Image (cartoon, rainbow, N blue to C red):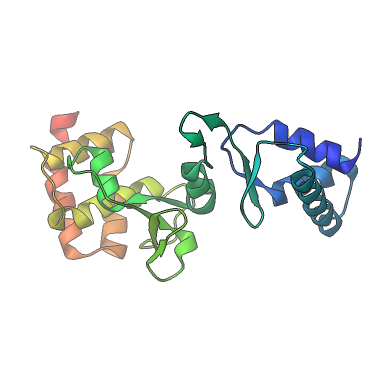
Amino acid sequence: MTYIEFVQGFVNNQPQGAPIYTNKIADALAGTYGLEKKKAAAAAAVAVKRIMTGGFIPDLRFYQKGIYYRTASTPFGETGINKEQLIANKYLIHDNGYETGLGLLHSLGLTSQMPNEHTIATNAAKDCVRYDRRLDVSVCPPKTHINAENKAYLQVLDALDIMDNAPVDADNPYGILAEHIRQNGLSYETLLYYADKYYNRRTIINLAHTTSFKEKTN
């Protein structure tokens, strides 16, 4: 099997709309043919280019450098790439981030207002807030480095941190958060530790309000 035939098979096995990364194709080539990383990357790039120019996979589309996708025809035109998956792969994968802002409050049931844009707290944001125009999402740095152990705690504390300045319209927001904490098995002691270390006094006060509903949710 030639490299082009291998890449064709790889691409055809991807769901329509799913991002197809040339570095992932290169990894597959390297593993199958025992190629060095640099040679595999070059082979992948050449194979994808020939597939595109030759029209060997008619539904294959270019998104941006290193990223392709398979489209589908509908009565309204061609379908695009799955942007939610792109966002997840770029900012959320491997416990690298989480949704925050108004989108978080809406998902928790604290506000009925739908966000105009979504905000992601992510380690990939470095030290500044910025807007990713291509993916239509704002990204911001977290209070501390996100990992699998602290992600759920930081997300709750973010909600407590911003709720006073957000259009919260739930009847019992602290009770809702207390139930969320209970259902996810989070520790109030750990929440207080992170709140005291990385957040402000108002967040700690709001956490105290939530604690008052602790027994009512048990």
Q: Is residue 24 left or right of residue 191?
A: right
112 vs 151, left or right, is left
Is residue 189 something one can see in this rendering? Answer: no
Is residue 214 depicted above or below 47 in this figure?
Answer: above
The answer to whether 195 appears left or right of 135 in the picture is left
Which residue is found at the position 23% from the left and 43% from the top? 114
- Give x and y (percent) for residue 115: 26, 48
Q: Position of residue 31 (x, y in %)?
A: 83, 43
What residue do we see at 82% from left, 53% from top? Answer: 46
**Is residue 196 depicted above or below 81 in this figure?**
below
* Number of callouts: 0
Q: Is residue 158 left or right of residue 93?
A: left
Compare residues 58 and 182 and report the one nearer the observer: 58
Asked whether 172 or 70 is in front, the reply is 70
Where is residue 122? Give x, y as percent: 44, 57
Residue drawn 45% across the image and 64% down it = 125
Q: Residue furthest right?
A: 1
Q: Is residue 35 visible?
A: yes
Residue 158 percent coordinates (x, y) = 28, 54
Q: Quadrant of the N terminus?
A: top right
Residue 211 in which image quadrant:
top left
Q: Name the quadrant of the C terminus.
A: top left
Q: Residue furthest left?
A: 171
